[in-house]
Amino acid sequence: MSFVSQVLSCAGQLEAKEIQGKMDLLGKKMEDLKLEIYEVTRGKYVDFFTQKLQATSALVENVEKVSGDLHDAKEKIENDVQNQLTLSKEVLTNLKGDLENHKCVLVILERLLQIQDNLECAASANKRHSYSEAAASLLKADVLLGTPLEGYDDIEVLMALQTECCVQKQKLIFEMTEKWKQMISWSSSDANSQSKSRQVFQLELTSGGNVLSEIIGAMETLGDLESTLKNFGKRLISDLFKPCVVNSTATVKNTPENIVIVTVNNEKTPVPPPPKQMYMNVMTIIQVLEKYFSDLTVQDGTNFLSCVGRQVSQELLELIVKECLTPAIPHNNKDMAEFEANCIEPTKAFQGILVNLKFIPEDDNALEEFVKNIDVLFVNKKSQDNLLRARELMKSELHNTVKVSDEYPLGEMAGGPSERKSRKVELASSGQGSSDTFKLPACQISACTQQLMTLAYETLEEATSSSQECAVQLFFAARNMFELFCSVYPTAHQKALSLFPQMSAVFNNDCMYVCHHLAMIGHQFNKSLPEDVQATFVDLMPKIRRLGTDTMLQQLNSQKDIMLDYLQAAKGFVSVSEGSNSTSTEKAVKQVLHQLGHLQKVWQEILPVNQYRKSIGTLLNMVVVEICDRVVSLEDISASDASQLASLMSLIQKRAGPLMKSTNDEGDVNVTIELQRNVPKWLRFTEIITVLNASLLEINDRWADGKGPLANELTASEVKQMIRALFQNTDRRSAILAKIR
């Protein structure tokens, strides 16, 4: 080794020892400083020992001094020693390792001091009500606490600082919230505590210099402004805006002290105010808010009133449209001009003011869309109201009836256009059918169905004077009424239709009445409706007619079952002259006649004459058939039994005639002809009565070798059976039986 190399080697060793000594001294200073910061921080934020507190500035100076020494050592190692050292690589690595360890400790100490400095600044700013500064300091501390330190996440002091930061943040939020409540205060009370007939809502906005601005800035920094605005918006809607929108009794008063008072009467079903009045009240409230928040902005420069608008405008506009403007839409075209002056123009002006105040964005077109679509909304409301009205009519009582006839096709109570009958006559004369083709038989229908049909005519009349789009929708609204009729009517009155025969008759008439008009109503309005509308209702007729006939048939079957139960008590009409049999048989027949008489009372004024006779005739025919079959099948009929049977059957024969009469008859009625027409087995019934009262010779004469009236109604075997049951076995009976074949 040369002399120069030896000299450099010795110099490097001396330099290394000097650096190592400085590193050891730095390590000792670092440990002392770490202990000092730990004790101060722990004493302040963990143990809360005030006697251990040390000024943060002194700690900062010590940390900065150590940081400078550490920086000098680093420069020495990297710039001087590294170029001169001739020692082993291991020595250099050890020096660098010590340096890095000291740097990591210093980073932690600096972080702790920065956090503590921000916490102290936040506390000091909070005491001065500099809420924005306090929030900014807490945010910086929170960011520092949230930045991870690898390998040092579980430091106890860091956890204490984290807790302190959360406590200060919550304390700041609480103080700002309380201050907000003092400056923006709400109250509500009953103006009349006894009757509670009125309610008062009040918003008081107190001036406070720049305090509110500080609160808003701090809340935005801490992310709490959104929830505060949300709660404020809810109270604005519920306490101020909503009463003004939904209740016509609402009055709004504002004072120079920025106090808004809304007073409303408590009503179960409040009536919405006219749109113009509502807009004036709402604008009074918004103008007070605009005056109070005029100088306040958030961090991006947005006016605070715009922030309030973002929270409440959508709900407010929806409330206005739903609760005030929509109910204000008129029911008739003739009221549209007045509606335009009192609603549409004020709505446009209101939206313009809100946009100018930046309470709503320029692209918020909820009110504009409402104004644009007023025609559609009008017809939608008209259609909806008509359908709701139709539904209510279908669910109303059936007991109230009105008389309809060809003279009054819509009922005597209807107030429809006078040309309707002429339209019907014109329609009838245009075809080649009978003069009775479109004649409506006199009967009674429910008043609700008559009103339903009048409503349908009025809807179609409205369609003829509306725009094409509205006309189409109104036409389908009229159709939908009758589709509802098919489902709502029988469901709503299901029990009454099954239990009460008069209700079944009314419903049957209602269905036939509706079908009668549906057959013509399309033709009547076809020329007045748009060409692309297939103005027809005839496709609904089969379903509606079937509803009526099915209901009537079910009632007839029910009545048949009732009468058959009565006749079961007759025990097959065996030995009807004996004791209890005589009583039970007579009772059964009288019960049947009583039931038929009851049906006559409830049906004769309701059903059309022909349908009434057909219905009564069907039931009477069932009774006749049942009695005839029983009597013909008897094997033994004594003279007293024959007399009793003839008496009972004659009673039915006597009472049957009046059953064929109706209060709707025009002129005299030949009951004999009507009985034969509507009771298919009536002649058979009368022939059996004749046989019961006749002798063998008379029976033979009525048989007349199979050509007499008896042969037309009874078979040879039935006549023979009755002869054998009625007469004893004699040569004369045998001779007569031999002739009957």
Image (tube, rainbow, N blue to C red):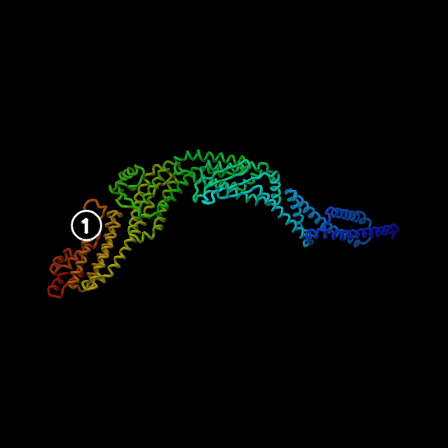
Q: Nearer the viewer, residue 198 or 623?
A: 198
* Residue 300 in picture, x, y percent from top left: 61, 39
On the question of residue 376 being in view, the answer is: no
* Residue 199 in picture, x, y percent from top left: 48, 43
Residue occupied by mark 1: 671
Q: Residue furthest right?
A: 3
400 relative to 718, above or below: above
Q: Secondary structure at mark 1?
A: helix
* 538 lies left or right of 714: right
Q: Nearer the viewer, residue 399 or 98?
A: 399
* 253 lies left or right of 592: right
* 552 lies left or right of 302: left
How many numbered marks appear? 1
On the question of residue 348 being in view, the answer is: yes
* Residue 696 in picture, x, y percent from top left: 12, 61
Q: Residue furthest front?
A: 194
Amino acid type indicated by mark 1: Val
* Residue 364 in picture, x, y percent from top left: 51, 38
For disc 1, the neighbor class at 10 Å (few under 14, some 14 to 19, many from 20) is some
Q: Quadrant of the C terminus?
A: bottom left
